[in-house]
Amino acid sequence: VSAKDGRIKDLDHNVPDPFRQSAVAKIGDNPFPTNPMSDRAKGFIDQGRVKSAITNYGSFINWDFHPSGIWGDYSYLPAVSFVGAVPGHKNTAHFSWQNLEIIIDEEGAPIYSIWESSNAYDDWFPVSGDTVYKGILFELGDDDGLYYPDNEKLTMDGFTDDKQFFFDHDERKIVISTFGDSDPNKTIARVGFIYPWALRPALISRESQFDFYDYGEDLEEWTDDDEYVYYGANAAESHFISTDYKTDWHASTMARTSSHQTEYNASDIFGSTPWISGDDTYPVLAHSAYADTWPVQMNLATGEMESYWPGWWSQDYNINLPGCSQSRKDPDCWEEVPGRFVSDMDVYMEFDDRWSHRANNVNTNDKYEQTGYPMGLRVKATAHSYGVSYAEDIMFVTVKVRNESGDWCAEDEDGNPVLDLNGEQECGEAMIMPDGTKLNRGKGF
């Protein structure tokens, strides 16, 4: 059995523009998402002493757009980015393991040892019926390791070496074998359980628009015959980049119509400010004070297109709300006030990580040098700016992160449905990847 390599990290180098359309390249059953560079836009926070340009691809503030995090006469925060991260595995040291047997050679030296754990099984197979992990990784090191799916045994009697495992469903135990007398209760055993999002189809080649993965003989994505490899932990960010299109976060697909508009540009709205020089045709994010920057939708009552605020409203404390415990810490005591904004200038944006794999460099076109990957996360964010004296030094960004790796219906932090403008719960299909597929066949993580 040969091991499947995990991740290789190296220095950056330039790659061709990854967003060029290719009419003949199609893998999934869904239409390609549009070029995310067309959905980029910028805004301006300038109501108080804090003044900054804001962008909608995860890098809220950066040196490419003026002003860059100015407070007074200085750029105090010239680079502010949003980071979303997940682990790749969970070490076996988090569980309790009992030694069953140590196999020794003729000289009495341990060859391999067999261990079992009940709470590891309960964590892998919770009573909810879903599974938490996807595989077992041996010889962990630098978030890399060896993935041997064929080393699963049907009975404990089938163990013949280390790096083997058995799921005892009758006794609700996981049994593994380790090298020598290595104890999985300790991290030095270097064994971990792989989270499902970190075990992904291997790269075959980088195409002009998307990365082509090994979807097996059936050519169906995310099925059992795919060639899976361990990609490791993942952090999506838009700060450590070499070129502006190689960000992990990109403006969400069709943000130019769903979260802002393209009829008015930066010169149209901010041409009289010191932030714009010359004819700046860059699109503008939705600003609370400028309805012309808002997206539009059909008013079914009038049959006309009308602008609407795509973000959220300010909230009022109301002790008369159902379930309110008369504490300001209780979210049930707060209600939105439509029409009232959070700050003197709210700037709204949406971005997601579906294109994050394109930030990886590829060696000889078939080997990742880094192994970032899309998690199916969509971020809705609003930057706030205050002009009043007691808050003029404040700028902050509120974010709402939604897992769209699978088909979804939105809920808040307390499990209550999130409603759309029509009072219905927000629901949608899983995020479509650049190759037209959905992560884990739309089941998500």
Image (tube, rainbow, N blue to C red):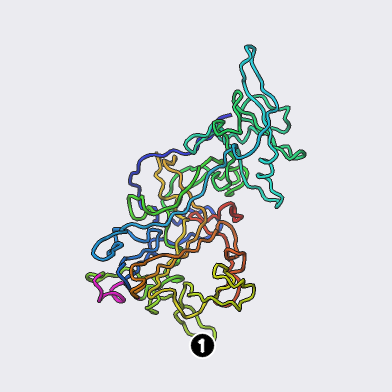
Residue 366 locus on image (x, y percent) = 44, 40
Q: Residue furthest front?
A: 326
Name the side, left or right, on which 411 lies relative to 313: right
Q: Residue 44, can we see it? A: no
Q: Is residue 197 above or below residue 60?
A: above
Point out the image quarter for the N terminus: top right
Which residue is tagged 1?
302
Residue 141 locus on image (x, y percent) = 49, 34
Name the side, left or right, on which 439 lies relative to 347: right
Disc 1 residue type? Thr
Q: Residue at x 51, y 57 (%)?
A: 377
Q: Residue at x 61, y 73 (%)?
A: 324
Q: Residue furthest top?
A: 107
Q: Residue at x 61, y 36 (%)?
A: 149
Which is nearer the eye, 415 or 330?
Answer: 330
Residue 273 locus on image (x, y percent) = 25, 74
Name the side, left or right, on which 112 lies relative to 127: left
Category of crowding for the residue at label 1, using alpha-carbon neighbours closer than 10 angstroms: few (below 14), some (14–19), many (at least 20): few
Which is nearer the eye, 356 or 415?
Answer: 415
Residue 119 locus on image (x, y percent) = 68, 41
Indicate whether residue 21 is drawn in magenta.
Answer: no
Magenta highlight range = 264-274
**Which type of secondary structure does the marked residue at label 1 adopt?**
loop
Residue 396 lies in quadrant: bottom left
